[in-house]
Image (tube, grey):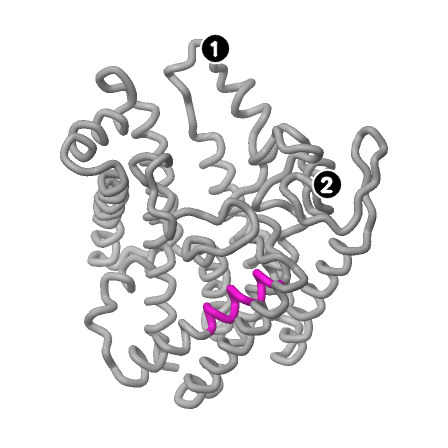
């Protein structure tokens, strides 16, 4: 089958936005579209991660086409290997940190012993593992049904299962910061010192936590369904997929009247809304890029998406190095930001231009890899 360029474009666009929003000059001066919602609500930045998970799902049918003659055991081993590598990459990023500006910082105590277990790559690993296994054994209708059942089960559990804090106070049906069944699971499974918000009350939790990974699997399954649709009928589904995406997003918006839109909890309304938007975007790109043939404008995103995990890893390592390397009276990042950007631009523009400059520098090794046909597949 002819390669689906629109999928490469959407993957590249998503990873570019991910690197951009993760690396402002200062978190104190960021334009609101480049920030996550404080809790309930939705900004453009809140769509980046579910878009990437959706794209990962769309790619599964295409990447497994040439493996269909292989045994189930071989496929399962391949899935396990890829998932483990993704998870270990996430663990590496979590450990790759040192604070030279704090005399009391101890890497063993403050990083290794209190490592954040989950994260972006760790969630991708778990989502891919379960989604890819389901894709082996279920057909398109079964995958769609599984996506619905997982979201419904997650909502039912979050709404009806009671849970208690250390004092014995019982809660039920909460969607608050630090107070939800998802937060309770994180605190008890991951441990209070191994999450992103260790000081949240009454339950420390992680926005890429264990329990909230369940509806994220639904996002990926919706992507698999779209991938199978495009694989079977590459000339047909653009208008139908776009309409389906709009309807799914509309359903998520209506559902938000009862269940808040929340990225950290991957609420059912957020799941439907973000997946619907991703589906509509892919349908539009499929029509423009694949069916109409307008591809030249999209080439930079194809390059970025060809080594998306490498792009993410390099940007994460570079961002940490900029902080860890001392320069002047502070870090190398602080010195560069002050002398190159903040001295010449307003705080918000300086912060944005730093992020754009960082993105461009990180793009160069990925472009070099693409030019030399060097692709790292995890």
Question: What span is colored magenta in the figure?
Answer: 269-279
Q: In terms of secondary structure, where does tag 2 sit?
A: helix
- In terms of image quadrants, where is residue 266? bottom right
| Element type at mark 1 | loop
Q: Main secondary structure of the magenta part?
A: helix
Residue drawn at (53%, 43%), measured in percent from left and top?
A: 119
The residues bearing labels 1 and 2 have C-alpha atoms spaced at a distance of 31 Å
Q: Residues within 10 Å of mark 1 (few under 14, many from 20)?
A: few
Farthest residue toward the front? 257
Using the image, tell me which numbered label, if any, was put on residue 283.
none
In the foreground, 121 or 286: 286
* Residue that lies at the very extreme toward the bottom in this rendered image: 236
Quadrant containing the C terminus in the rendered view: bottom left
Query: Mark 1, mark 2: which one is toward the viewer?
Result: 2
**Which residue bears the numbered disc 1?**
104
The residue carrying mark 2 is 184
Percent coordinates x, y for residue 256 in the rendering: 61, 63
Q: Nearer the viewer, residue 273 or 294?
A: 273
Which comes before the other along the chain, label 1 or label 2? Answer: 1
User: Is 274 colored magenta in this rendering?
Assistant: yes
Q: Position of residue 142 (x, y in %)?
A: 67, 77
In what quadrant of the picture does the N terminus appear? bottom left
Label 2 crowd bin: few (<14), some (14–19), many (20+), radius 10 Å: many
Q: Residue furthest top?
A: 103
Occupied quadrant, residue 177: top right
238, above or below 221, in the image = below
Q: Is residue 125 visible?
A: no
Residue plotted at (60% across, 40% down):
206
């Amino acid at each position: 089958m002819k390669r689906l360029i629109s999928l490469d474009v959407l993957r590249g666009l998503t990873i570019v936005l991910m690197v951009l929003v993760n690396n402002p000059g200062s978190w104190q001066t960021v334009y609101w579209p480049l920030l996550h919602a404080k809790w309930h609500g939705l900004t453009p930045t809140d769509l980046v991660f579910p878009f990437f998970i959706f794209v990962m799902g769309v790619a599964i049918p295409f990447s497994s086409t040439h493996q269909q003659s292989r045994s189930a055991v071989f496929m399962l081993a391949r899935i396990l290997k890829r998932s483990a590598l993704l998870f270990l990459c996430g663990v590496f990023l979590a450990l790759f940190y040192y604070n030279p500006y704090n005399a009391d910082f101890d890497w063993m105590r403050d990083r290794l012993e209190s490592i954040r277990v989950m994260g972006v790559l760790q969630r991708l690993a778990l989502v891919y593992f379960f989604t890819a296994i389901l894709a082996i054994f279920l057909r398109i209708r079964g995958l769609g049904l599984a996506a619905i059942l997982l979201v419904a089960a997650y909502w039912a559990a979050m709404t009806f299962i009671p849970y208690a804090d250390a004092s014995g106070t019982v809660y039920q049906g909460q969607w608050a910061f630090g107070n939800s069944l998802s937060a309770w699971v994180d605190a008890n499974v991951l441990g209070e010192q191994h999450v992103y918000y260790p000081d949240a009350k009454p339950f420390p939790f992680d926005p890429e936590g264990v329990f909230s990974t369940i509806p994220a699997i639904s996002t990926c399954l919706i992507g698999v369904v779209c991938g199978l649709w495009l694989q079977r009928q590459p000339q047909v589904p653009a208008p139908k997929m776009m309409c389906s995406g709009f309807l799914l997003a509309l359903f998520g918006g209506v559902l938000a009247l009862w269940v808040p839109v929340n990225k950290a909890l991957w609420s059912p309304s957020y799941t439907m809304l973000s997946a619907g938007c991703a589906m509509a975007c892919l349908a539009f790109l499929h029509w423009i890029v694949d069916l109409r043939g307008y591809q030249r404008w999209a080439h930079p995103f194809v390059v970025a998406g060809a080594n998306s995990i490498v792009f993410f890893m390099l940007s994460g390592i570079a961002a940490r190095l900029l902080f860890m390397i001392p320069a002047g009276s502070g870090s190398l990042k602080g010195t560069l930001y002050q002398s190159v950007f903040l001295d010449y631009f307003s705080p918000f523009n300086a912060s944005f231009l730093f992020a754009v400059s960082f993105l461009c520098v990180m793009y160069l090794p990925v472009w070099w890899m693409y030019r030399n046909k060097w692709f790292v597949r995890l």
